[in-house]
Image (cartoon, rainbow, N blue to C red):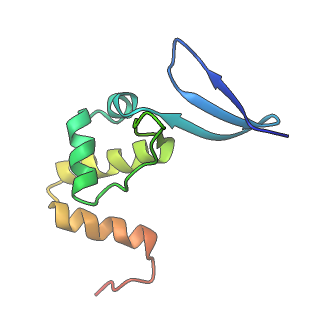
Amino acid sequence: MPHKVFHFRKYPLLTWYYGRECILLIMKIDHVAKQAGVGVETIRFYERKGLLGQPPRTYAGFREYSKEAVAKIRFIKRTKDLGFSLSEIAELLSLETNPQGHLC
């Protein structure tokens, strides 16, 4: 069964379905920024610094983010508020992708 795309005008999010199962929620950068409580430029800055991976883009060049990106941005914001530097945050994020990394 092919994927179906639904666009809700009130909430400009794209939801991909396979049958009745929701697979992915995709948002544009301004909606991610609003949900994460940061500015659009902050998200772009995190991408440039390597804290946030480069998201896929539409044919028109718009960034497409998943709900996991919102959680990661919130984590970065919280750790920054706790006083962690960007390099320390990058190290913490690397533990997520490489749990066998050096802890000492």
From the top left corner, tell me how far across and down residue 75 is, in percent: 33, 51
- Residue 81 image point, x, y percent: 18, 48
* Residue 57 figure quarter: top left
* Side of 28 where 45 appears, left or right: left
Residue 22, by quadrant, is top right
Relative horizontal placement of residue 95, taking residue 19 as reference (left or right): left
Furthest-front residue in view?
A: 59
Task: Tell me if residue 82 comes above or below residue 67 in the rendering.
Answer: below
x, y percent for residue 88:
21, 67
Q: Quadrant of the N terminus?
A: top right
Q: Can you give x and y, in whole percent of width and height, for residue 86 in the image? A: 18, 60
Instruction: Give left or right: position of 47 versus 26.
Output: left
Residue 98 figure quarter: bottom left
In the image, is 20 to the left or to the right of 103?
right
Between 57 and 49, the one lying in front of the other is 57
Please give the name of the residue rendered at 40% of the width and 37% of the height, measured from the top-left corner.
61
Q: How many marks?
A: 0
In the picture as drawn, the residue positioned furthest to the top comes out as 10
- Work out which quarter of the rendered image holds the C terminus and state it: bottom left
Q: Which residue reaches farthest right?
A: 1
Q: Tell me which residue sits at (45%, 83%) in the image.
A: 100
Residue plotted at (53% across, 36% down): 26
**Most foreground residue, 94 or 41:** 41
